[in-house]
Image (tube, rainbow, N blue to C red):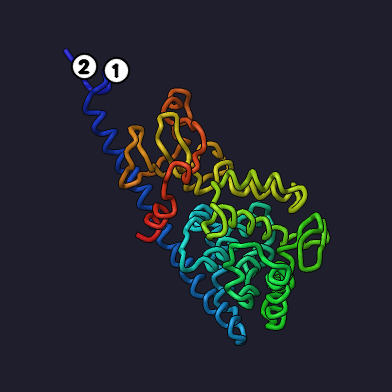
């Protein structure tokens, strides 16, 4: 005779209850994530609108009003303090008709997360955000044909493009609306530790530290972004490139700290589990760097799942779970034909 529930024999009814509760919890996690992303995207839209106005004013020689951008950066600071992962998720959103605004937003977020990770003062983190938002303002004075050129630039063309840092700095300094720390970011974000940068050929510690931090964020986002001038890299490949270049260009200690701010598996990385499932990293934590929160893209059986559910891999850290839930390795989405930008767009804006 079958024993009653609780006396040591597994009751099939328990399975139904367990699965139902697990699905309810999974849906709640996904709904919470979606709500946070929708709220954060409003800030992303505000930033794009504010940047468009300021860049347009710069292009037409009008006086700059940086109040809206300052307000966005302060809201970014509050959001990053509360949940940096949501803001990092938005750095993977690529709107092809607004690439300059998206790139500027991304640099601000990446640099501010970097600054918070380093426990810098609020004033310095805000300066990182303002400098990141406006670092390429001077490019509005560069002819579009030069910025979009795929062939090698002539010496004269390169000189024009190199002038954008000093151009942006001069106009922003004249506006009297930025602290010197943010102005230095705009002026020196293309300087390199080996002295091969511009506009002044500074080297080593003579380059302001905040400018070097924004330079690292700029290099990283340029490598992972689909900006048309190179094939985008997977986040971890871009971090390896930064490590290789760090000694000469950025300084190894700062690069290591930047990598620490993003985690072992940066938000936007694609993982393959031992089961064969593909997962997109949407959040990581210092407490479980090797077991991030992930969104399922492809099931164990090879089906591309909809809706895309979330799983916290830290819940599957025991030895018995590793056959299915252990991480086999990183996957380059381009190499397997995965349209990651479309997935991120859909999960963010739909």
Q: Which residue is mark 2?
A: 3
Helix, strand or loop at mark 2: loop
Measuring 55% from the left and 80% from the top, which residue is drawn there? Answer: 56
Q: Quadrant of the N terminus?
A: top left
Circle 2/circle 1 CB separation < 8 Å: yes
**Residue 336 placed where, x, y %?**
44, 41
Q: Is residue 12 left or right of residue 295?
A: left
> Which residue is more in the foreground, 126 or 189?
189
Q: Quadrant of the C terminus?
A: bottom left
Residue 52 position (above or below residue 5): below
Q: Is residue 288 visible?
A: yes
Measuring 82% from the left and 56% from the top, which residue is drawn there? Answer: 204
Crowding around mark 2 (Cα neighbors within 10 Å: few <14, some 14 to 19, many 20+) is: few
> Which residue is more in the foreground, 184 or 230?
230
**Residue 176 placed where, x, y %?**
70, 82
- Disc number placed over residue 8 in the picture, else none: 1
Q: Is residue 182 visible?
A: no
């Amino acid at each position: 005779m079958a024993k009653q529930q609780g006396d040591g024999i597994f009751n099939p009814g328990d399975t139904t209850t367990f699965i139902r509760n697990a699905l309810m919890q999974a849906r709640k996690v996904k709904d919470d994530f979606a709500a946070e992303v929708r709220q954060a995207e409003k800030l992303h839209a505000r930033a794009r609108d504010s940047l468009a106005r300021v860049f347009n004013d710069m292009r037409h020689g009008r006086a700059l009003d940086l109040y809206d951008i300052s307000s966005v950066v302060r809201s970014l600071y509050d959001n990053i303090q509360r949940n940096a992962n949501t803001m990092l998720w938005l750095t993977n959103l690529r709107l092809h008709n607004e690439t300059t605004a998206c790139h500027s937003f991304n640099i601000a977020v990446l640099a501010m997360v970097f600054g918070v990770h380093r426990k810098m003062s609020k004033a310095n983190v805000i300066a990182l955000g303002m400098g990141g938002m406006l670092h390429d303002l001077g490019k509005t004075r560069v002819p579009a044909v030069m910025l979009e050129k795929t062939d090698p630039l002539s010496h004269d063309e390169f000189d024009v493009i190199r002038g954008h840092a000093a151009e942006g700095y001069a106009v922003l300094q004249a506006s009297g609306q930025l602290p010197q720390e943010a102005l230095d970011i705009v002026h020196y974000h293309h300087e390199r530790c080996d002295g091969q940068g511009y506009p002044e050929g500074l080297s080593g510690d003579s380059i302001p530290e905040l400018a070097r931090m924004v330079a690292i964020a700029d290099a990283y986002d340029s490598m992972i972004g689909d900006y048309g001038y190179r094939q985008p890299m997977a986040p971890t490949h871009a971090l390896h490139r930064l490590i290789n270049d760090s000694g000469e260009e950025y300084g190894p200690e700062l690069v290591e700290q930047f990598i620490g701010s993003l985690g072992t598996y940066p938000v936007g990385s694609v993982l393959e589990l031992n089961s064969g499932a593909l997962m997109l990293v949407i959040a990581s934590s210092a407490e479980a760097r090797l077991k991030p929160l992930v969104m399922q893209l492809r099931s164990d059986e090879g089906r591309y799942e909809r809706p895309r559910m979330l799983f916290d891999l830290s819940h599957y850290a025991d030895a018995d779970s590793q056959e299915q839930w252990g991480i086999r390795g990183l996957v380059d989405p381009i190499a397997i034909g995965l349209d990651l930008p479309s997935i991120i767009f859909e999960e963010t804006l739909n």
